[in-house]
Structures are given as structure tokens and as C-alpha cells.
Amino acid sequence: MGVLEVVVTAVWVMLPAYVPNNAAVLAGGGRPLDAGRTLGGARLLGDGKTWRGLAAGWLAGLAVALVLDTLRVDIADAVGVDLPGFPLAVVVLFPLGAMLGDVGASFVKRRTGRERGAPFPGVDQLDFVLGSLPLALVAAPSWFLDTFTPGVVGVVLVVTPVLHVLTNGLAYLAGLKTEPY
Ligand code: CTP
Ligand code: MG
């Protein structure tokens, strides 16, 4: 695979893990996952992790994976890249992993004295990758190893922070997010 093909494959396969975060920002609010509980004087997760955000993010990612599967052959023909499909277990668990990675990052942020919304460079940009890839591996091991070649993983680690900074900056400018990260 050439570099361009690897980049196209990486972005394609990560879309169901990218969209949940943005959906959570749009739909989030209401009861926090931690129900206000604290640990060592700080919130367990904080008010930025809600049930509605988790559910909306998960369902949005699931829907994206289903839609991509139906469009796959046409898009693959159009761009000339043999794009991977999404097995059902991956459709379900991959976006859930993205949301759980985000929850895990908030847990770490609260334990390290960072208030809700405080930036944590690197972690904010890659938490959903760290959550989604392991769950995809569990969901479909051989699909995972075929799809996430070392080249694809490398591109994901480089391209994800760039896309994250861009989309969050846009969401901030559009007034959808209170911080640009
Ligand atoms: N959100 C949510 N539920 C989630 C994830 C996100 O409701 N499970 C919403 C919240 O309104 C949150 C916003 O999306 O404020 C932005 O998400 P994120 O940046 O992950 O949360 P922060 O508010 O920055 O909090 P944290 O410091 O814990 O990351
Ligand atoms: Mg944040």
C-alpha cells in the first residue's frame, strides 16, 4: 500500500471512533456518570461525562459504521482503495471503546488535579484511540490484525491529533464547545 492508501484507510476505519466524541459534545448533558461521587477529594469523572453523552456518542459511532459498510464498495471503487468493512462485533464495540477511552481519560485527569475541561495535551487527542483499538481487537482479533497494520496504526497516531485539533477548534468557533480542545 502506498502512503496515500494507508492514510485513506486509516481515516476511513477510524471514523466510527472519531464521530462519538463530537456527538457527545452536541448531545451531552444531564446526569453525570459518576452521580457526583468523589475520590480523594476530586470528582470521580466530573460533570463532563454524562449518560446522555455516552449513549449518543456510542449510537452515533455505531450508525456511522453501519452507513460506511453500506457505502463501502462504492467509495472503494471511487477512491481506488480496498477499504475494510466493519464486522458486527466491531460496529458495536469500536465506538463504545472510543467513549470508554474518553471516560478513562477524565478519570486520570481528575486523579492528577485537572479540573473538568482542563487541557491534557496528548491524552485529550488520543484517549478515544486508546479505548477503541483494544475493544476492536477483542471484538474481532483477525479483522483487527488485518486492518490495523503497523502503517495504519502509525498514521492513526499522527492524523488523529491533527483532526482532533481541527474539529474541536471549529466546534469552539461555532460556539458548540466552551474550550477549543
Ligand atoms: N460529554 C458528555 N458525556 C460524555 C462525553 C462528553 O456529556 N461521555 C459532553 C460534555 O458536555 C462535555 C463535552 O461533551 O463537557 C466535551 O467533552 P470532553 O472534552 O470530553 O469533556 P470536558 O468537559 O472537557 O471534561 P474532561 O475534563 O473530563 O475531559
Ligand atoms: Mg475537554
Image (cartoon, rainbow, N blue to C red):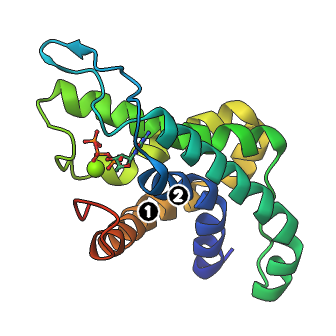
Is residue 126 visible from the viewing direction of this image? yes
Q: CA distance from mark 2 to mark 1?
A: 8 Å
For label 1, the residue is 160
- Above or below — where is 112 with respect to 149? above
Q: Earlier in the sequence, mark 2 or mark 1?
A: 2
- For label 2, the SS is helix
| Residue closest to the eye, 28 or 122 | 28
Of circles 2 and 1, the one toward us is: 2
Badge 1: few (under 14), some or many (20 or more) residues near its Cα, within 10 Å? some
Instruction: Name the amino acid, label 2.
Output: Tyr
- For label 1, the SS is helix
Snapshot quadrant of residue 112: top left
Q: Position of residue 105 (x, y in %)?
A: 33, 36
Q: Report the label total.
A: 2
Q: Quadrant of the N terminus?
A: bottom right
- Above or below — where is 20 with respect to 53? below
Instruction: Name the amino acid, label 1.
Output: Thr
Question: Could you tell me if the residues under marks 2 and 1 are in contact, i.e. CB atoms within 8 Å?
Answer: yes
- Above or below — where is 57 with respect to 172? above
For label 2, the residue is 18
Q: Residue at x 57, y 54 (%)?
A: 150
- Above or below — where is 117 with respect to 103? below
Question: Does residue 89 appear left or right of residue 163 in this picture?
Answer: right
Q: Quadrant of the C terminus?
A: bottom left
